[in-house]
Image (tube, helix red, strand yellow):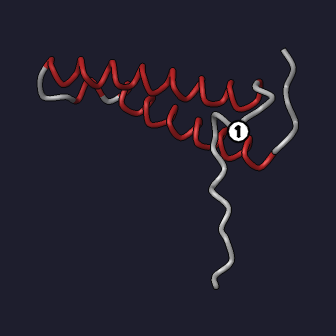
């Protein structure tokens, strides 16, 4: 495994995004005890675990994949106004 260093801006923004997704999942996971019934507590548990997994995947992919063009898309180029 090699940490890639090209397109640092995209990699850093993707890392920040992954951290945010992970934090949202961790919050959902930790407040599941405040749910009014067992059904909502179960949903909060699995949503939290899923979001934490997605956050870890986003961070990992952002730094280990060499070509990010098919993962984190660049915005389309704008043609000049005529």
Q: Is residue 33 left or right of residue 61?
A: left
| Left or right of 77 on screen, residue 40 | left
Figure quadrant of the C terminus: bottom right
Residue that appears at 36% across and 31% down: 28
Q: Is residue 14 left or right of residue 35?
A: right
Q: Position of residue 35 (x, y in %)?
A: 19, 28
Numbered label tally: 1
Image quadrant in which you'd find residue 11: top right
Q: In the displayed structure, would residue 16 be above or below residue 43? A: below
Residue placed farthest to the top in the image? 1
Q: Residues within 10 Å of mark 1 (few under 14, many from 20)?
A: few
Query: Which residue shows up at 59% across the image and 37% down it?
Result: 19
Residue to which mark 1 is pinned: 69
Q: State whether residue 81 is above or below residue 53.
A: below
Q: Position of residue 41 (x, y in %)?
A: 22, 22
Q: Position of residue 72 (x, y in %)?
A: 64, 40
Task: Give how far across and how far down residue 62 sits, in percent.
Answer: 70, 32
The quadrant in which residue 70 appears is top right
The N terminus lies in quadrant: top right
Q: Secondary structure at mark 1?
A: loop
């Amino acid at each position: 495994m090699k940490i890639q260093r090209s397109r640092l801006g995209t990699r850093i923004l993707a890392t920040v995004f992954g951290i945010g997704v992970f934090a949202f999942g961790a919050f959902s996971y930790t407040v599941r005890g405040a749910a009014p019934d067992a059904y909502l507590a179960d949903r909060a548990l699995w949503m939290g675990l899923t979001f934490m997994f997605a956050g870890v995947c986003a961070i990992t992919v952002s730094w280990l994949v060499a070509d990010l063009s098919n993962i984190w898309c660049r915005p389309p180029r704008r043609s000049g106004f005529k």
